[in-house]
Amino acid sequence: MTEPLLITPTELRQHHYCPRVVFFERCTPVRRRETVLMTHGREKHQTELLRERRRTLSRYELTEGERRYDLRLTSPALGLTGELDLLIVDGTRAFPVEFKHTSRPPDPGHKLQLCAYALLVEAELDLTCPHGYWHSSRTRQTHTIPFDTRLRNRTRAAIETVRGFILAERCPPPTSQPVKCLECELRNFCGDTL
């Protein structure tokens, strides 16, 4: 019996940014080179996780809860696998937390990523995730992201879309915002965007 194709919540975010990023990584021998910005972001991410271990839960408007860092979850039923930055568990409720090194507020791709982690938590840990938190290490702002029915449905649909084009090995159309291509490390492989 073959293993089901599993995608990551990060790939959902990347797909929202540009559908071709996931295609090139999953369906071709092309490997993305880590850019200076990617390296810097990863280093800042690690620093933020270290700081988080010393903080209270007040930024999440919680008084108590168990923190679980770098939590690896897999659900073949959902077709998802991933490693969550932080999960705060308070009784039967859980709150996924993502840290990003950006000054921009969370975009729809970030919300899909966070909701995918919530679906994983609910499926694998049997906890309820009413909302999650998205924290910017640049602005120090923490945004509450409610996991309403609409976002959950969009996330499930995105999972199926990404899995579908990977299984078909079909190159999706490029992003509708060509300005994103200017700094993309994969721009030389698209051939039809610039």
Image: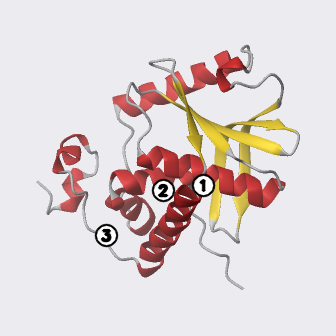
Tell me the crowding category of disc 3: few under 14, some 14 to 19, or many 20 or more residues within 10 angstroms, Cα based: some
Marks 1 and 3 close (CB-CB < 8 Å): no
Q: What residue type is labelled 3?
A: Pro
Q: Which amino acid does label 2 sit on?
A: Leu
Among the two numbered marks 1 and 2 on one chain, the one whose residue lies closer to the N terminus: 2
Q: Distance between the residues labelled 3 and 2?
A: 14 Å
Tell me the crowding category of disc 2: few under 14, some 14 to 19, or many 20 or more residues within 10 angstroms, Cα based: many
Q: Is residue 85 above or below residue 3?
A: above
User: Which residue occupies the foreground of this view, 153 or 49?
Assistant: 153
Residue of label 1: 116
Q: Which amino acid does label 1 sit on?
A: Ala
Please name the colour scheme applied to the rendered image. secondary structure
- What residue lies at 81% left-to-right and 51% top-to-bottom? 127
User: Which residue occupies the foreground of this view, 8 or 24?
Assistant: 8
Residue of label 2: 12
Q: Is residue 35 above or below residue 130?
A: above
Residue of label 3: 172
**On residue 59, which mark appears?**
none
Apparent side of residue 145 relative to residue 26 in the rendered image (left or right): right
